[in-house]
Amino acid sequence: MSSDRSLPVKHAVVGEDVIVNKPESFMHNRLGEIWKVKADGERLKISVSFDGEIYNFYREELKLA
């Protein structure tokens, strides 16, 4: 996956709309809203809400909606 399509760090904020960009996931291409952002070592782990259901992704697996 190319990093230029991933969610920019400045947009990794609660309330931002994102699209899952992870083809191997059943959530691929789903639109959600960032619920929580947490540093996981050098990477950002982002919790995304889809109609109240929360799923976790890394920043590189999301793109701006």
Image (cartoon, rainbow, N blue to C red):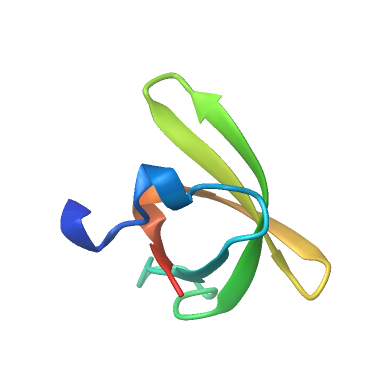
Residue furthest to the right in view is 52
Tell me, yes or no, if residue 37 can be seen here.
Answer: yes
Q: Does residue 19 appear to the left or right of 8 in the view shown?
A: right
Q: Position of residue 63 (x, y in %)?
A: 38, 65
Q: Position of residue 45 (x, y in %)?
A: 53, 39
Residue at position x 24%, y 63% in the image: 5
Is the N terminus in the top left, top right, bottom left or bottom right quadrant? Answer: bottom left
Q: Does residue 63 appear to the left or right of 57 in the view shown?
A: left
Q: Does residue 25 appear to the left or right of 14 in the view shown?
A: left
Viewer-closest of 26 and 63: 63
Q: Does residue 32 appear to the left or right of 64 in the view shown?
A: right
Viewer-closest of 16 and 45: 16
Residue at position x 52%, y 26% in the image: 39
Residue 10 occupies which quadrant of the picture? top left
Q: Position of residue 30 (x, y in %)?
A: 54, 79
Count up the numbered dots. Answer: 0
Above or below, comparing residue 45 to residue 63 in the picture: above
Residue furthest to the top in view is 41
Q: Position of residue 6 (x, y in %)?
A: 30, 57
Tell me, yes or no, if residue 1 can be seen here.
Answer: no
Above or below, comparing residue 55 to residue 46 in the picture: below
Above or below, comparing residue 28 to residue 55 in the picture: below
Residue 34 occupies which quadrant of the picture? bottom right
Residue 62 occupies which quadrant of the picture? bottom left
